[in-house]
Amino acid sequence: MLRENFDKAVSWVQERIPADLARAVSANDLTSAFDALNALPARASATFLIPDLFPGVSLETLYVHDVGKHSSDAGVSDTMTRPGSVSPLALTAIGTAIAKELQDTGTDMVHYPLDGEAEVIVFIPDVRSTVLHATGTTLLTS
């Protein structure tokens, strides 16, 4: 079932990215990137913000670890720890597809509920304060 979902996600990305980017990134690279993104929440023990998950794409990603809590402290990852098998180009393609979808639908964020009590919110940087406020998240930065 998960593989089928990844196949649909790969097709969804390929339909939304420019042709030159689609030629440059393989379906296998996209599948590997989705697999790595899918594994992130299982390793998480706290809420965190990744401002550069999608290289070259102006989107931020907030993983909310415990949705039911009224407030959450979050760290900011300066850079995502990317396993060697994840192609930055594949992440750029995924981010480009999400950005296009946001533009086409006139929205500034998308919410992905996860199994359990977690969620991922991908959003344009201009609405960071709104997303943090809505989720009760306070960023802890150095």
Image (cartoon, grey):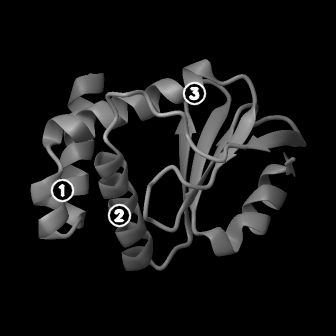
Q: Which residue is mark 3?
A: 41
Position in image of residue 8 (x %, y %): 22, 42
Q: Which amino acid type corresponds to the residue marked 2 in the rendered image? A: Thr
Q: Earlier in the sequence, mark 3 or mark 1?
A: 1
Q: Residue at x 58, y 63 (%)?
A: 123
Q: Which amino acid type corresponds to the residue marked 3 in the rendered image? A: Pro
Q: Residue at x 64, y 69 (%)?
A: 125
| In front of the other: 118 or 100 | 100
Element type at mark 1? helix
Q: Which residue is mark 2?
A: 96
Question: In which quadrant will I find the N terminus?
Answer: top left
* Category of crowding for the residue at label 1, using alpha-carbon neighbours closer than 10 angstroms: few (below 14), some (14–19), many (at least 20): many
Res. 14 mark: 1
Res. 46 mark: none
Label 3 – label 1 distance at C-alpha: 25 Å
| In front of the other: 59 or 24 | 24
* Category of crowding for the residue at label 2, using alpha-carbon neighbours closer than 10 angstroms: few (below 14), some (14–19), many (at least 20): many
Q: Quadrant of residue 96?
A: bottom left
* Category of crowding for the residue at label 3, using alpha-carbon neighbours closer than 10 angstroms: few (below 14), some (14–19), many (at least 20): some
Q: Is residue 47 left or right of residue 123?
A: right
Q: Residue at x 74, y 36 (%)?
A: 47
| 105 lies above or below 135 | below
Q: Which amino acid type corresponds to the residue marked 1 in the rendered image? A: Gln
| In front of the other: 15 or 44 | 44
Element type at mark 3? helix
Q: Quadrant of residue 128?
A: bottom right
Q: Is residue 24 left or right of residue 112?
A: left
Q: Earlier in the sequence, mark 1 or mark 2?
A: 1
Position in image of residue 130 (x %, y %): 77, 67
